[in-house]
Amino acid sequence: MTLLKRDKEKIIMKYLIISSGLRKEGNSWAMASLCCKRFQESGEEAELLALSDHEMPYCDGKTYVDHPTTQLFRDKVGAVQGIILATPVYNFDANSAAKNFIEITGQVWENKVVGFLCAAGGDKSYMSIMALANSLMLDFRCVIIPRFVYASSSAFSNGAVTDATVVDRIYELSDELVRFTTSLNSS
């Protein structure tokens, strides 16, 4: 079920930018924050959800279902058409908080358009997000934007994205999410 507001024939999309880094205002958060700012400056309805601000249960097969944060997260994911997941890259993969978030929210990811912002220490893990992208495609039929942003530590300074190319790519990803969600929800 798609939750859309119609405003005089214009479809208004909702977007969620998830910062899965658990370090307050780390590099993935800086990317997510810049992305959210881009959406808001262009008049889009967007929210930044920092997992570091919430007590998140582990997906243990049972008790997480009744945790109040689980329902909060499910409601947020369920209410949007597009999601940008910003994650640090550890050991050639998205961080465990990102994977746990997806596991506890589960089916509400179905048919969402998803993009990725990846912050890593070096440039060797460029393809690391593919396992998570494939999982979202296969498990929940998400549409994955084939353009994602990968930035190494050299792209950041003092808690901000300082590499102009990375900033441009974050803006392009934001624009692509709007383009994808608008196209897929216009019928």
Image (tube, rainbow, N blue to C red):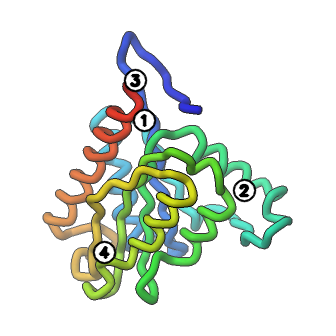
Q: Position of residue 44 (x, y in %)?
A: 36, 35
Residue drawn 28% across the image and 36% down it? 42
Residue sitting nearer the eye, 79 or 132 = 132
Q: Position of residue 161 (x, y in %)?
A: 26, 67
Q: Which residue is mark 4?
A: 158
Image vertical order of residue 11 relative to residue 56, above or below: above
Residue drawn 47% across the image and 76% down it? 94
Residue drawn 50% across the image and 26% down it? 4
First of labels 1, 4 by sequence position: 1
- Give the residue type that dot 2 points to: Thr
Mark 3 secondary-structure assignment: loop
Q: Is residue 110 left or right of residue 56?
A: left
Q: Residue extending furthest top?
A: 8
Mark 4 secondary-structure assignment: loop
Q: Residues within 10 Å of mark 4 (few under 14, many from 20)?
A: few
First of labels 2, 3 by sequence position: 2
Q: Residues within 10 Å of mark 2 (few under 14, many from 20)?
A: some
Nearer mark to the viewer, of 1 and 4: 1
For the residues labelled 4 and 3, say whether their Cβ atoms are less than 8 Å apart.
no
First of labels 2, 1 by sequence position: 1
Q: Which residue is mark 2?
A: 69
Task: Measure the C-alpha gap from mark 4 to mark 3.
Answer: 44 Å
Q: Residue extending furthest left?
A: 164
Q: Residues within 10 Å of mark 3 (few under 14, many from 20)?
A: few
For the residues labelled 2 and 4, say whether their Cβ atoms are less than 8 Å apart.
no
First of labels 4, 3 by sequence position: 4
For the C terminus, the image quarter is: top left
Nearer mark to the viewer, of 1 and 3: 3
Q: Is residue 101 left or right of residue 66?
A: left
